[in-house]
Amino acid sequence: MDGQIQALRAVATRAAQRGRLVITGHDEPDTDSVASCVLMRALLSHWDVQAQIVLPTFAEAQAKRVMQRLGVDVSPMYAQTEAADQLVLVDHHSALHPGHVVICVDHHPTACRVEGEYVQIAPCGACAFQVYRLMERAGMEPDAALKRLAVAALYLDTVALRSEKISAQEAQWAREGAAHLGMDVQWLTAEGLQMDDLTQPPEALAMTGKKAYDFGGRRVVSTCVQTDAMTPALLERILAVLRTAAQESGACLWVYLVHDPVNLRSVRYDITPDGRVAITRYDTLVSRGKTVMPQVEQSLSRAAVKGEDQSPV
């Protein structure tokens, strides 16, 4: 067992002795967030460290559907954290609910200081895969059910292995793992692409994939849609909804992403509370966590240093 793994085990053991050890993902958790929680609990259990998964907000519809197919019922995980809880954050790095952060394992880069006695933030296609690697380094031999979770998380968190954030090695591992485990690759691909139904009302399309971020006290909200058929008329109706949402949210910025998994490109719309919109076009299927949010964080930091309005638009 290497030094990093020993450190993680020691921190988890001490924390469990101080109080309830709670593993939690980000709000409105997606498949990767829930899978990361389940894998982390398995790792801690391997060390005889008792931990409970707590999801303070309901999981996304896709996460509930996918996890159920993979044999995981998320409903018992819904609860609230408490101030005395010892928190293990996975798939996010900023505590959103009561408790004391002791461990953080994430794959979203940040320049902000991250709380915790053990912090591991590294680029990776999916946080669940990062936890899976920790399990292997700890000497575990994860069973097929746990490996399925890591494979599914990679497919779903990287737009069916098409996102810029997944390495060639990770994509190969996911493909080989799916084949070895007899997983339905057509289903994994369809779930990963998750093309949105554009017949939905603009109000619904404006709010898909919603996540909130805190960059040194500056709140940013982001939503996204995946389609290869966005029209200018529909986009304008969605942006009208988002102008109102940005004003009412209390955030300094609302970032809306339109991902086109077919043509492998993305467009970013930054909406400020006063209704301004800045557009950035990417010639790749850009990652919100790996590229877009770090860019937003840097822009906000520069604006703060200059004493400007906290929105980068």
Image (cartoon, helix red, strand yellow):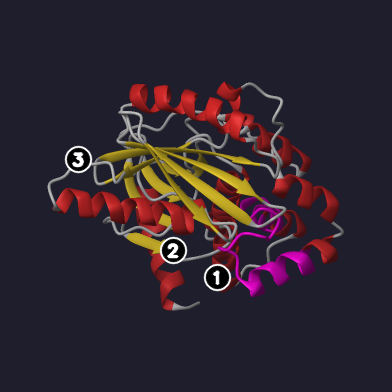
User: Do the residues bearing badges 1 and 2 touch, measured as CB atoms within 8 Å?
Assistant: yes
Location of mark 3 (residue): 309
Tell me residue 209's x, y (percent). Answer: 56, 37
**Residue at 15% across / 53% down in the picture?**
305
**Residue at 37% across / 56% down in the picture?**
295
Amino acid type at mark 3: Asp
- Secondary structure of the residue carrying numbered label 1: loop
Q: Earlier in the sequence, mark 2 or mark 3?
A: 2
- State the predominant SS element of the stretch in magenta: helix
- Tell me the number on the disc at residue 9: 2
Amino acid type at mark 2: Arg
**Residue at 59% across / 24% down in the picture?**
202
Q: Earlier in the sequence, mark 1 or mark 3?
A: 1
**Residue at 64% across / 69% down in the picture?**
170
Q: Which residues are magenta?
A: 150-177
Q: Is residue 241 above or below residue 192?
A: above
Q: CA distance from mark 2 to mark 3?
A: 43 Å
- Tell me the number on the disc at residue 78: none
View extreme (front): residue: 232
Q: Earlier in the sequence, mark 1 or mark 2?
A: 2
Q: Is residue 126 above or below residue 55?
A: below
